[in-house]
Image: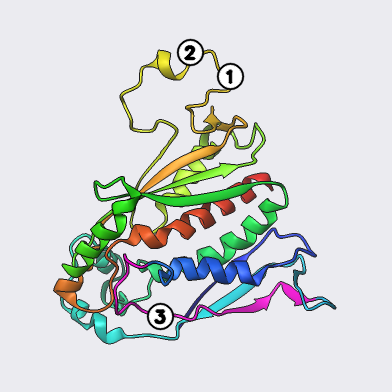
Amino acid sequence: MAIGGVIDGVCAGEVIDMEKIREALLRRSGRKSKVGTSPRARIEEDKVEWLSGVMEDEEGKLRTTGTPIAFLIRNAEQRPEDYAFLAQADRPGHADYTYRQKYGRYYDYRGGGRASARETAARVVAGEIAAQELSELGIAIQARLIQVGEEKDTSRFEDVLKEVQQAGDSIGGIVECTVTGLKAGIGEPLFDKLQCRLAAAMMSINGCKGFEYGTGFDMKYRGSEIYHAGEVPCPMSGGIEGGLTNGLPVTFRCAFKPAATLTRLYGGRHDACIAVRAVPVVEAMSALVIKDLLL
């Protein structure tokens, strides 16, 4: 079994920094985090195989050819037996029930499907290529975990996650992302507003339950405090006004639910907090959205 993708719109001659791709995939795997993933977590090598769209130059650097880039990541460590119970039962809060209603007897419950976080590895590869192109334009994307459950003190995250992990339970979290270096005017009116595109991209990530930018759902402010402080562009708009960038950093947050698959109920290898591994995925999807709008 394997996952992969096809990337279009990359100019010829761009250098692909494989070390940065490996680093992003390592962050997504959870292996760089002390907590948040199962001690028995699935360990994948995540080796990228390029099928088209790239070639080595005379210096051995991997460069794009201008044609669609196809790549493959083989699944090395598969344990379908961990999901055998799903042949007879659906997990509450997971996609099992709805997928089974849509696909019937051909719903593949063996793990690694479209409702699995495994598919995000392909997003990270594509997003990192986009991010490398954006960096040449002075655009940088940085995401971080800012909340675990109700805890906002980052120094307490490890303790909270260890407690949840030891209980075989799961907990939600919030990831904040900031994009710098964007000039004003990027985006489209109405249906392709920047926040619409970002929201659609983030909500497509498995486990994402909410999206907000700027002041978002924080209702403690009045309009006089937000919009009439005498500053244009507005510094509290999250870098977006009227669906277009205003030249300030774009800042948004994504809420991730507690994982529906609990180790204490189902055994296997399951995350205590999927938000931990979602950080590089949020960065990747941000890069893809922005690169697409710039095209």
Please give left or right for residue 46 compared with residue 70 in the image.
left
Instruction: Give yes or no for residue 223 being in the magenta stretch.
Output: no
The type of residue carrying mark 3 is Ile
Q: Main secondary structure of the magenta part?
A: loop
Asked if one can make out residue 5 in the rendered structure from this viewpoint, the answer is: no
Front one among 215 and 54: 215
Callout 2 crowding tier (Cα within 10 Å): few <14, some 14–19, many ≥20: few
For label 3, the residue is 43
For label 1, the residue is 232
Q: Position of residue 14 (x, y in %)?
A: 76, 63
Front one among 117 and 180: 180
Q: Quadrant of residue 267?
A: bottom left
Depicted 173 relative to depicted 129: above or below: above
Q: Position of residue 95 (x, y in %)?
A: 27, 64
The type of residue carrying mark 2 is His
Depicted 29 relative to depicted 148: above or below: below
